[in-house]
Image: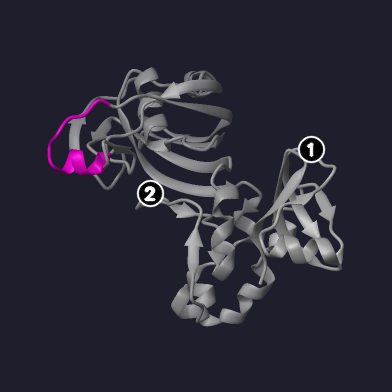
């Protein structure tokens, strides 16, 4: 992206699995500072779960470590099992993940054949629904809306287990990240063919944070505010969009004082 757009900095708000496709919000130049406000987003996926086969990575990229016959699974049974995952719960992340334990990523332990205790994480499944069941190929397609930190590979294995078999994540397409939707996205190929086409896809900081309350500062206050001086304001604690005669960025109010946070240059 840096090469295509000829810019200095590009950041992102969360990785995708190697075989996954879909939405990946990118932060251009100084907007990389916004990452702290974008990592808590809920997400939505379209998933293909392959039943009857287990891999060491829980996805199609891994080595097959077990095979099991898939017996008499009905659409009604699948829908009932999917529905059982709705709500708050604990989930064990896959061993092949970037979660760090004692300063080392889990997949590094896995690649070295080492074992380590994995603790469950609190997640929430908001919506999960069946798209299609191909009983000849033993593949289930479903849509899921979930909280940050949900591992779809682990979800696939857990669904398979409840169906009295094993399985792995064959395909994954992330369709929504927070307010970013796949229909509003642009592909790398499209950008390579016409880098100017990104202009209509860019979301400004002001628009992205439009849900935040705003605060207006006068010229004297702005000068001090931009120099890092805390300004007295009659506002509740929180993050605010800051304006004078234009949008400046964000400030943080604590104990009736506001200090600069992210300021546009």
Residue 47 visible in the snapshot? yes
Task: Give whichever of 166, 203 is nearer the camera.
Answer: 203
Secondary-structure class at tag 1: loop
- What are the residue bounds of the magenta stretch? 104-117
> In terms of image quadrants, where is residue 100?
top left
Classify 10 Å Cα crowding around label 1: few (below 14), some (14-19), many (20 and above): some
Q: How many marks?
A: 2
Question: In the image, what residue occupies the spot 26% across and 36% down?
Answer: 102
Task: Give whichever of 258, 106 is nearer the camera.
Answer: 258
Q: CA distance from mark 2 to mark 1?
A: 40 Å
Q: Is residue 115 magenta?
A: yes
Question: In the image, what residue occupies the spot 76% across and 54% down?
Answer: 241
* Residue 236 tag number: 1
Looking at the rendered image, the disc whose residue lies closer to the viewer, 2 or 1, is 1
Secondary-structure class at tag 2: loop
Outermost left residue: 113
Reply above or below: 199 against 224. below
Is 79 displayed left or right of 243 in the figure? left
Task: Give whichever of 72, 206 is nearer the camera.
Answer: 206
Residue that mark 2 sits on: 17
């Amino acid at each position: 992206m840096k090469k295509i757009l000829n810019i200095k900095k590009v950041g992102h708000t969360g990785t995708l699995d190697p075989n996954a496709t879909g939405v990946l919000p990118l932060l251009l130049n100084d907007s990389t500072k916004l990452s702290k406000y974008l990592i808590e987003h809920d997400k939505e996926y379209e998933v293909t779960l392959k039943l009857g086969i287990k891999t060491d990575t829980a996805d199609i990229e891994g080595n097959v470590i077990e095979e099991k016959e898939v017996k008499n699974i009905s659409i009604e049974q699948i829908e009932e099992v999917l529905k059982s995952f709705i709500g708050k719960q604990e989930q064990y992340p896959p061993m092949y993940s970037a979660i760090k334990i004692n300063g080392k990523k889990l997949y590094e332990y896995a690649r070295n054949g080492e074992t380590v205790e994995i603790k469950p994480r609190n997640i929430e499944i908001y919506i999960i629904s069946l798209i299609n069941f191909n009983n000849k190929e033993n593949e289930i397609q479903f849509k899921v809306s979930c909280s940050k930190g949900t591992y779809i590979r682990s979800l696939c294995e857990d669904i398979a287990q409840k169906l009295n078999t094993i399985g792995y994540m064959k395909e994954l397409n992330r369709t929504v990240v927070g307010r970013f939707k796949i229909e509003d996205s642009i592909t790398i190929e499209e950008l390579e063919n016409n880098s100017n086409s990104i202009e209509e896809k860019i979301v400004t900081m002001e628009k992205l944070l439009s849900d935040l309350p705003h605060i207006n500062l006068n010229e004297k206050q702005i000068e001090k505010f931009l120099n890092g001086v805390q300004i007295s304001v009659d506002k509740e604690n929180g993050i605010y969009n800051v304006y004078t005669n234009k949008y400046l960025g964000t400030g943080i109010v604590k104990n009736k004082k506001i200090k600069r946070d992210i300021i546009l240059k």
